[in-house]
Image: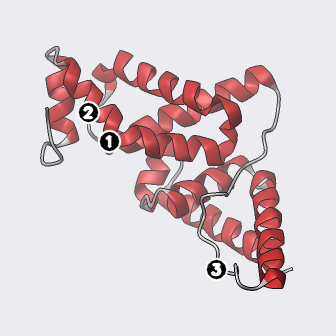
Amino acid sequence: MPDGSVSDGELIDRWRRGDELAAAELIKRHATAVARFLGASGGGDDVEDLVQEAFFRAFRSIARFRGGSSFRTWVMTIASNALKDLKRRARRGDVLSLEDRDVADTSADPYGETVSRDAVRRVEAELGRLPRLQREVFLLRAQEGLEYDEIARALGTTPGAARVHYHHAVQRLKRVAEA
């Protein structure tokens, strides 16, 4: 099976020629990041289904992938659209979880532990209240480490706008964490 030295582009070409294992490798490489993004974006209990839907849509329309962005960015865009579709249908807002985020070790200090938990809860709640674009830009930048041009392509905006949305999200989350 392909290893890490095989590019996503080559795997896409292999899949287009009928190599099912190439598709499996693409999913293996990117599913965790897509799931993390969807979970933090409010996918809730639907994350697994949304990840499957995103990859299903991606492989169904792979002919439209031109390589102008990375495969991961393209799948993140599709996943974001699948989540928007789900939310439109369900008309519900899910609470975002930051359980996997690093927090200072306060295990030896009960007061510090309580303060940290409270700060995480406040930030988690505020993240859920951010405007959709600010929240998605923040998550793609902070959680997935995408560059602004990749974020812009994924969300249909400009790199400058992505920077502004990220800045506003960070400022708002900092104020809540410090409160």
Residue 34, given in percent of the width and then of the height, sits at 48, 41
Structural distance between the alpha carbons of marks 3 and 1 = 30 Å
Q: Name the residue under label 1.
A: 29
Q: Where does residue 117 sit, x and y in percent of width and height?
A: 79, 69
Q: What residue type is labelled 3?
A: Asp
The numbered mark at residue 105 is 3
Q: In this view, does 158 lie to the left or right of 96?
A: left
Instruction: Name the residue at 66% across, 50% down.
Output: 133
Q: Mark 2 points at which residue?
A: 25
Q: Earlier in the sequence, mark 3 or mark 2?
A: 2
Residue appearing at x 82%, y 78% in the figure: 115
Confirm or deny contact between disc 2 and disc 1 (CB under 8 A). Answer: yes
Query: In this image, 84 relative to 141: left or right?
Result: right
What amino acid type should be assigned to the residue bearing mark 2? Glu
- Mark 3 and mark 2: span between their CA atoms? 36 Å
Q: Which of 145 and 122 is in front in this view?
A: 122
> Mark 3, residues whose alpha carbon is within 10 Å: few (<14), some, or many (≥20)?
few
In the shown orientation, is residue 58 left or right of residue 24?
Answer: right
Callout 3: helix, strand or loop?
Answer: loop
Q: Which amino acid does label 1 sit on?
A: Arg
Q: x%, y% of residue 147?
A: 42, 61
Give the secondary structure at mark 1: helix
Q: Which residue is drawn at 60% across and 64% down?
A: 101
Residue 62, image x, y percentages:
31, 22
Instruction: Give the mark, 3 or 1, whose residue is nearer the N terminus.
Output: 1
Looking at the figure, which quarter contains the C terminus? bottom right
Category of crowding for the residue at label 1, using alpha-carbon neighbours closer than 10 angstroms: few (below 14), some (14–19), many (at least 20): some
